[in-house]
Amino acid sequence: MKNQIEVVKQRVEARIPGVRAVIDEPLKREGPWMLDVDFNDQAVNVEWRPHRGFGVSSRESHGYGEGPDEIFSEIGETVHRIVELLKTRASTATPSEVTLAELRERLRLSQSELAQRLKVSQAAISDIENNLPRSQLRTLRKIVEALGAEIEVRAVLPKERVFTIKLTKEVRLPSHHRVPSKKLAVRSLRKGKKGKKGRIR
């Protein structure tokens, strides 16, 4: 029985005659499967981990060691995007806004791995990602720091005027304050440093 990345390869080959698609199996069981697809000098890289979806990047937009540009959960939408990129010779783009879960996935971290960094349970991370409106801003900042990034709040005014309100480490909010339900803009600084360890509270 074919796994999901093998199904993607098969469907792309059926949609585009003459395409070259090569699968690179992981060296370790928990590692990612890679699919390199080439057609008329246009290349697309696909990364797949079981139960964690597909990461798609066009070679021109992708730097070495970076996470995938676009994340998909379903085989059908992944195949459609690959075919579209190859036929239109378009490039993938890194989103300007991401959810906390999307940022974690881009950095190739599982919920369990992030939980280990913060010394909390995987269930606690899952609850925060799925119920962000209930999370305190201080808690969210700790999670983002553990991902090696920095959280920012942006004020968008009329006529597309945008001001970024940078949060300092001294920010403290009362427990009754809640994070808005809309997506938060998170800018990865790629500093390579680990976030502070400690109990989330």
Image (tube, rainbow, N blue to C red):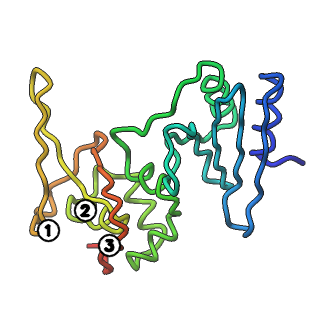
- Furthest residue to the front? 41
Q: Which mark is residue 169?
A: 1
C-alpha gap between disc 2 and disc 1 = 8 Å
C-alpha gap between disc 2 and disc 3 = 10 Å
- Furthest residue to the right? 1
Viewport quadrant of the C terminus: bottom left
Residue at image mark 3: 195
Q: How many numbered tags mark residues here?
A: 3
Quarter of image, res 27: bottom right
Residue at image mark 2: 141
In front: label 2 or label 3: 3
Mark 2 vs 1, N-terminal side: 2
Residue 14 image offset from top left, x and y in percent: 83, 25
Considering the numbered disc 2 on the image, is that residue within a helix, a strand or a loop?
helix
Mark 2 near mark 1, Cβ–Cβ under 8 Å? yes
Considering the numbered disc 3 on the image, is that residue within a helix, a strand or a loop?
loop
